[in-house]
Image (spheres, helix red, strand yellow):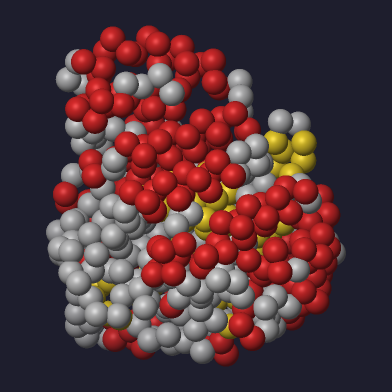
């Protein structure tokens, strides 16, 4: 169906963000890899509705859609995949709204793996965002382009809105300010290059009206633990009522979503008690209630913290059977559940400085014990976590790095998938003025962490890859001394353990271009980390 006049407000996102990666949210990490390593087969297009509107869309875009439909009417708002933009953008179109998570490839994953793989080129997220902005329907249109979403800060931070042809960048949570901003845009008023939106109350956040990718349903927003490198931890925490959550689960299941992704910064903080004490009854009720809704085949929790696992092991014991039964994952033939957790560092000093709320109700000095014991308890219940580590936190010293190596040694043999990341100074975090961690600044022990983590991942999750990588390493070794060979073959050598560390450090692995990895001046900011 082609609407020659167009729709007044058209909402969209890049190809990458409009795919569910065949119901695998963790493969979406591949969007942070160099573009030529990420084939479009990894992120196939989702089915459309009969009128060519998007059958599934990113959860945040669905929230925006609900707000705008309530204000301007359903006939004036449409969500479209980029493939169908020409069907909805026309003379009547006044605003094209774009949601984005990582538009310039300067998020944690993109910065890390585009640079550490040692290959020049754009991250897939950046390439797809540029493709969207150069879409013929957009180029021909006089509509205002408004970009928002969790990654919008990257554009404003790099002052890229004008070079990219974006009229306005919206930074922050949308619910309180969005309708007012779109009213002004539709009236032809100037909005300015960057607009910072006010944080909403829980009551201002609407239900989605149409199905979301991964069947995403937000169970709580914010965290409150106060980690200095992270933006959600600085937001006020509130949990949505169970009835609110189940309405969105039912809507997704009714519209063909087989999976429900419980979007949260910490599953174990849902309806939490004082001092971050988990509310076992509320969490168990939530998981049971979601699992009983007809059509829900899979349940995936987005994030969880580790301290509550130690505090109340019975909590994990009660929900694990459901999460495992409703899981997509297997590890070497064994069905298991997974959830993203943040280990970040083994250093009590850095935990105390930047993350002292992360291990509550325990003390920073107990962090290694908390991590080791919680991973053991999760594994005992067939939950194999995906764990992030941060390399290059501001002020990180050799003793801090060695403490992380010590913790990883304690975790040897655990069923865990590690994702080591370079420190990234997000705009909404307390450390926003600190310099990004850079691959060229990594020292020998930090490379040891990175390569050791990926060796562990292969051994635990896909040991059959070991032979392939070893062969690639042996074949590639002679080419390391060639100009381009150093960059192309370095990753195989690191992961296989065959690398000559001195040769590697001389190779001078080149990080991303400055235009998509802006280096911020290191600024001492009073109160950071306190």
> Which residue: 75% across, 68% down?
312
**Which residue lies at the image location 47% right of the left edge and 16% below the top edge?**
470
Residue 428: x %, y % from top left: 34, 73
Quadrant including the C terminus: bottom left
189 to 333, vertically: above or below: below
Q: Nearer the viewer, residue 506 or 36?
A: 506
Q: Is residue 15 left or right of residue 299?
A: left
Residue 155 sits in quarter: bottom left
Q: x and y percent of residue 417 in the render? A: 57, 43
Against 53, is 31 above or below? above
Answer whether residue 326 is visible to the viewer in this image: no
Q: Is residue 236 visible?
A: yes
Q: Nearer the viewer, residue 143 or 522?
A: 522
Seen at 54% across and 81% down, the residue is 237
Residue lying at 28% horizontally and 42% vertically, measured from the top left: 442
Q: Quadrant of residue 377?
A: bottom right
Q: Is residue 210 above or below residue 333?
A: below
The answer to which of 164 and 328 lies nearer the viewer is 328
Q: Total marks drawn?
A: 0
């Amino acid at each position: 169906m082609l609407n020659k006049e167009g729709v007044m407000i058209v909402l969209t996102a890049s190809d990458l963000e409009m795919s569910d990666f065949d119901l695998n949210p963790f493969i979406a990490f591949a969007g942070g890899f160099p573009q030529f390593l990420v084939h479009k087969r990894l992120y196939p297009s989702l089915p459309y509705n009969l009128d060519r509107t998007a059958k599934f869309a990113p959860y945040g875009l669905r929230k925006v859609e609900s707000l705008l439909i309530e204000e301007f009417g359903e006939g004036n708002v449409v969500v479209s995949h980029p493939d169908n933009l020409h069907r909805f953008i026309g003379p009547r179109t006044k605003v094209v709204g774009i949601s984005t998570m990582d538009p310039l490839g300067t998020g944690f994953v993109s910065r890390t793996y585009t640079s550490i793989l040692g290959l020049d080129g754009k991250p897939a997220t950046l390439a797809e965002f540029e493709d969207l902005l150069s879409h013929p329907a957009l180029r021909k249109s006089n509509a205002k382009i408004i970009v928002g979403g969790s990654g919008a800060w990257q554009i404003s931070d790099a002052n890229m809105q004008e070079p990219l042809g974006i009229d306005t960048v919206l930074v922050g949570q949308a619910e309180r300010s969005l309708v007012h901003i779109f009213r002004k845009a539709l009236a032809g008023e100037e909005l300015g290059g960057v607009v910072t939106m006010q944080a909403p109350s829980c009551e201002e956040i609407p239900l989605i009206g149409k199905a979301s990718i991964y069947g995403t349903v937000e169970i709580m927003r914010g965290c409150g633990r106060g980690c200095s490198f992270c933006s959600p931890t600085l937001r006020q925490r509130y949990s949505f009522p169970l009835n609110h959550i189940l309405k969105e689960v039912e809507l997704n299941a009714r519209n063909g979503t087989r999976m429900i992704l419980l979007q949260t910064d910490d599953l174990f903080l849902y309806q939490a008690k004082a001092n971050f004490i988990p509310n076992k009854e509320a969490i168990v009720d939530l998981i049971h209630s979601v699992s009983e809704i007809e059509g829900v085949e899979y349940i995936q929790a987005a994030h969880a913290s580790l301290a509550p696992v130690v505090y109340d092991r019975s909590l994990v014991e009660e929900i694990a059977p459901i999460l495992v039964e409703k899981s997509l994952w297997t590890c070497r033939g064994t069905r298991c559940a997974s959830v993203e957790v943040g280990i970040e560092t083994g250093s009590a000093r850095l935990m105390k400085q930047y993350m002292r709320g992360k291990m509550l109700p325990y003390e920073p000095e107990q962090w290694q014990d908390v991590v080791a014991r919680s991973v053991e308890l999760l594994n005992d219940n067939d939950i194999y976590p995906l764990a992030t580590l941060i390399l290059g936190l501001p002020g990180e010293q050799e003793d801090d790095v060695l403490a992380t190596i010590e913790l990883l040694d304690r975790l040897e043999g655990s069923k865990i998938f590690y994702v080591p990341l370079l420190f990234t100074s997000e705009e909404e975090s307390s450390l926003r003025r600190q310099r990004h961690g850079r691959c060229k600044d990594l020292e020998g022990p930090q490379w040891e962490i990175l390569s050791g983590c990926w060796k562990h991942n292969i051994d635990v999750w896909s040991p059959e890859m070991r032979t392939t990588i070893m062969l690639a390493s042996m074949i590639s070794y002679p080419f390391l001394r060639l100009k381009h060979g150093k960059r192309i073959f370095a990753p195989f050598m690191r992961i296989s353990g065959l690398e000559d560390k001195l040769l590697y450090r001389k190779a001078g692995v080149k990080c991303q271009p400055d235009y998509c990895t802006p280096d911020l001046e290191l600024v001492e900011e009073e109160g950071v980390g306190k």
